[in-house]
Image (cartoon, rainbow, N blue to C red):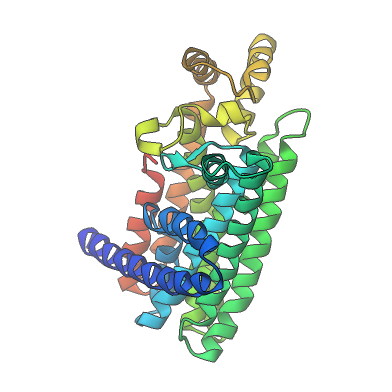
Amino acid sequence: MVNDARGTLLEIREQVQSELTSYLALQREYLSSIGSELAPVCDALESFLLEGGKRLRPLFAYAGFSATGVVATAADIRAFTSLELLQACALIHDDLMDRSDTRRGKPAIHRHFENLHQQDAMNGLSDQFGEAAAVLLGDLALVWSDHLLHTSGVANDALLSALSVHDEMRIELMAGQYLDVRESGEKSPSVDRSLRIARYKSGKYTIERPLHLGAALAVTDPAKRKDLTNILSAYGLPLGEAFQLRDDMLGIFGDPSVTGKPAGDDIREGKRTVLMAMTFERADQETRAKLSAALGRADLTANQIEEVRDLITATGAVKVVEDLIDGLLSNALTAANSAEIAPSARELLIELATSAIRRSH
């Protein structure tokens, strides 16, 4: 059954890739009619969207749709695909806010356009141009996500049903992003605050809301899908938090050749993750002082990053976070086996959960 689920998800992933490719080709044609200067915008977004990405959000939307027992159409797949464009907006802006240099082993969008400015010997400041371009390209991806959903071809009642979830998801994402930005200004880390950020910045828009969006497209009457929606939340919320916790672990301990990010990038960026908050909670005064001195320093060497990793591990925080991930995953898997979920979708949810949490990038 798991192999069947894996094959189904692979097939849907390929369909999402195809829909993205077609949509971006249409947008290139439209933008090219405005001016040739927009070609680099098309090039950058096509590369960003098509050359990488796990397509998790469309896959979770498909699983939420399938949980109702309804069979998805090509129009539904296009609607699910719109979530990849929302994800692009979030990543482009996130990299800008974090001052990240790379994404998936290539220059982040703001760095890419900064480089273009320098290569073309344009007037003005190259870093300012790169930042402005990243804001605009992220906004464009957000507009495109709406446009693809609206023009997906789903029935009007299905579209209206999905829009309330879609709007709430985007509001939660922006709220979580702001909380994440604000956290860097707090005087000390907090496990509770970091967990809340993990839920709203990543967990809900990665898993819970895509599940709800899929279910809303399949069953337009909220009363008829209420019990299923609750079960999908019981599955999606813990899984979403576990997903972000895994992301936090990879941001510090991940292999750069796999993650596409420099080793220990989250340390150099000074990210206030749950792992870091738990580390501070368990560390003695001397260790806290060393960590505080290192966090947010962009010039840390590989050896200094390794020293910080050792300090984190020595506090026992890594084991605590891994145990928390395991517990959250267990809760999600229990919910996936609920009777409210169509039997054909249970293995999809289980396969998605394990692949999302056991990933290495």
For the question of whether residue 279 can be seen, the reply is yes
The C terminus, quarter of image: top left
The N terminus, quarter of image: bottom left
Question: Quick one: which residue is furthest to the top in this view?
Answer: 286
Q: How many marks do you count on the picture?
A: 0
For the question of whether residue 197 can be seen, the reply is no
Question: Quick one: which residue is furthest to the bottom in this view?
Answer: 156
The quarter of the picture where residue 311 lies is: top right
Q: Residue at x 64, y 26 (%)?
A: 296
72 on left or right of 287: left
| Figure check: 236 above or below 243 | below
- In this view of the protein, which residue sits in the foreground, 99 or 71? 99
| Figure check: 309 above or below 257 | above
Q: Residue at x 41, y 38 (%)?
A: 260
| Figure check: 276 above or below 122 | above
44 on left or right of 99: left
Position in image of residue 175 (x %, y %): 71, 55
Position in image of residue 3 (x %, y %): 21, 59
- In this view of the protein, which residue sits in the foreground, 184 or 243? 184
Q: Residue at x 62, y 61 (%)?
A: 139
Q: Residue at x 47, y 12 (%)?
A: 303
Position in image of residue 247 (x %, y %): 49, 41
Position in image of residue 234 (x %, y %): 52, 60
- In this view of the protein, which residue sits in the foreground, 258 or 299? 299
